[in-house]
Image: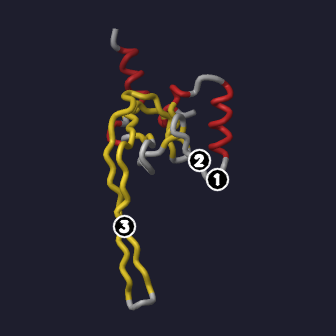
Amino acid sequence: MVLDNIYYGTIMRCDVYKDVTSVSFNDGATIDKFGYSEHIDSVYMEDALLAYVHGVYIVLGNLKNILDYYIVDEELKKSSIRLNNNTIISTRPFHEGSLFVSEDSLRPYYIEEDSKQYIK
């Protein structure tokens, strides 16, 4: 795994999730559907160690044994990755109770580790 893809970040929990959708009918033949989602979040875990792989974040602290590594590895080989609330998470919530990474909180791991080596 490349160190450029490892980060510290905050994992958020979605407490309230609501889809706001609008539908408009144009000339009776076409339908336009658009909208957005509103959500209220709370901090679930600060300074979590995360790896960015195939467009999702892996929570490295939740990989406890070789079976966990195998399950994540097999999931990443699939064409559509199934999000797992404990280990494989996205950058936005999809429903109440889902975990996601706050992109604003991400900091590269390797810069902090390099600076620790030089401070003595």
Q: Give the crowd class for mark 2: few <14, some 14-19, many >=20 residues within 10 Å.
A: few
Disc sitting over residue 20 in the figure: none
Mark whose residue sits in front, 3 or 1: 3
Q: Answer few, some or many: residues within 10 Å of disc 1's Cα (few below 14, many 20 plus, some between 14 and 19).
A: few
For the residues labelled 2 and 1, say whether their Cβ atoms are less than 8 Å apart.
Answer: no
Q: CA distance from mark 3 to mark 1?
A: 29 Å
- The residue under label 3 is 21
Which amino acid type is shown beneath numbered disc 3? Thr
Q: Which residue shows up at 31% across the image and 46% down it?
A: 40
* Front label number (2 vs 1): 2
Is 66 on the left or on the right of 99, as rendered? right
Indicate which disc residue 82 carries. 2
Residue that mark 1 sits on: 79
Q: Residue furthest top?
A: 120
* Crowd rating for badge 3 (residues with CA inside 10 Å; few <14, some 14–19, many 20+): few
Q: CA distance from mark 2 to mark 1?
A: 10 Å
Residues at marks 2 and 3, CA–CA distance in whole angstroms: 25 Å
